Image (cartoon, rainbow, N blue to C red):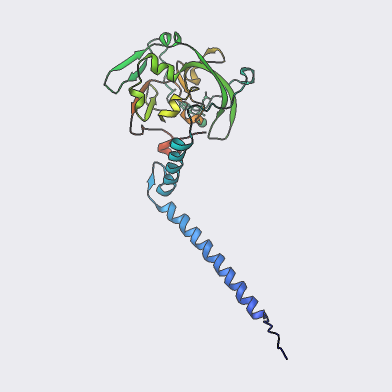
């Protein structure tokens, strides 16, 4: 007679397995908590823990080098879709704007500085940009801006050598707000040095006389009231980067 081999699972076995799977789960949770604590205990790098900063830097290098294309335009909108932009971000705008003596300063890497008036800028070909302006606070709105395409500006003022450098720095006249931007994003055709909003001169709190509009970036990079522009291969100082945000801030 053939004895069938039957294996019984006893209640004891079930208890054992239940206990084992619970143990695995508990150990995994403990490891997660310990890992998160460890991250929090690492020395900070510009406002956030080093391991998190390393992740942001890795994302940046993937997007900057492999994914980003200068040719890709941001999603188009009709000018009629634009709303009057809200005001956000007063840094560097608290002094009274110098409405008569203002000149844009461009520090070339050969040491020369160009001083460019608003009228000179307005004499150059005008480019209109309508795009969905996104702030890292979570809001967005379709807005319309006019100014000089940065790549046209580069050609007109013979800054081709300067933009071979990896970064452009923009700083307010009082130096209280400052951003650094990678070359490809600066040369994207919708990046403009902007002096008009909805066909009218920029309001003071929106950056009069000149601001950056750069649709491939979050709002933090659209520096209002530009004082000085310069170029470097090192990352320039960046206000929100120093406070824990992503340097790249790309969309
Ligand atoms: N000088 C200056 N520019 C700035 C800021 C700022 O605080 N100071 N804030 C930035 C942020 S976070 C946003 S969302 C936009 C807002 O532009 P708006 O006021 O025209 O809407 O400006 C950017 N440019
Ligand atoms: Mo913002």
Whether residue 70 is visible, yes or no, is yes
**Left or right: 27 as drawn, with respect to 112:** right
Q: Could you tell me which residue is drawn at 37 percent across and 27 percent down?
A: 169
Q: Could you tell me which residue is drawn at 44 percent across and 23 percent down?
A: 94
Picture coordinates of residue 229 (x, y %)?
A: 37, 22
Q: Could you tell me which residue is drawn at 49 percent across and 36 percent down?
A: 67
Q: Could you tell me which residue is drawn at 54 percent across and 24 percent down?
A: 87
Residue 141 figure quarter:
top right
Q: Which quadrant of the figure contains the N terminus?
A: bottom right
Q: Residue furthest left?
A: 111
Q: Residue furthest right?
A: 1
Picture coordinates of residue 135 (x, y %)?
A: 54, 31
- Is 23 located above or below residue 173 in the figure? below
Picture coordinates of residue 113 (x, y %)?
A: 30, 17
**Left or right: 16 as drawn, with respect to 154:** right
How many labels sit on residues?
0
């Amino acid at each position: 007679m053939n004895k069938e081999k039957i294996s019984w699972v006893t209640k004891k076995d079930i208890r054992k397995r239940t206990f084992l799977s619970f143990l695995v789960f508990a150990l995994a949770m403990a490891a997660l908590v310990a890992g998160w604590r460890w991250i929090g205990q690492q020395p900070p790098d510009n406002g956030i823990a080093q391991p998190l900063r390393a992740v942001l830097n890795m994302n940046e290098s993937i997007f900057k080098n492999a994914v980003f294309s200068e040719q890709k335009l941001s999603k188009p909108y009709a000018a009629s879709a634009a709303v009057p932009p809200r005001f956000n971000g007063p840094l560097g705008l608290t002094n009274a704007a110098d409405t008569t003596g203002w000149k844009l300063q461009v520090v070339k890497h050969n040491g020369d500085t160009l001083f460019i008036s608003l009228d000179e800028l307005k004499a150059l070909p005008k480019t209109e940009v309508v795009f969905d302006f996104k702030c890292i606070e979570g809001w967005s709105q379709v807005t319309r801006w006019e100014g000089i395409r940065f790549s046209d500006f580069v050609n007109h003022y013979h800054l081709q050598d300067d933009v071979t450098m990896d970064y452009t720095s923009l700083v307010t006249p009082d130096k209280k707000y400052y951003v650094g931007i990678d070359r490809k994003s600066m040369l994207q055709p919708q990046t403009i040095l902007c002096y008009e909003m909805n066909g009218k001169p920029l309001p003071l709190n929106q950056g009069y006389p000149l601001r950056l509009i750069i649709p491939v970036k979050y709002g933090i990079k659209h520096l209002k009231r530009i004082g000085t522009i310069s170029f470097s291969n090192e990352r320039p100082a960046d206000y929100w980067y120093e406070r824990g945000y992503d340097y790249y801030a790309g969309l």
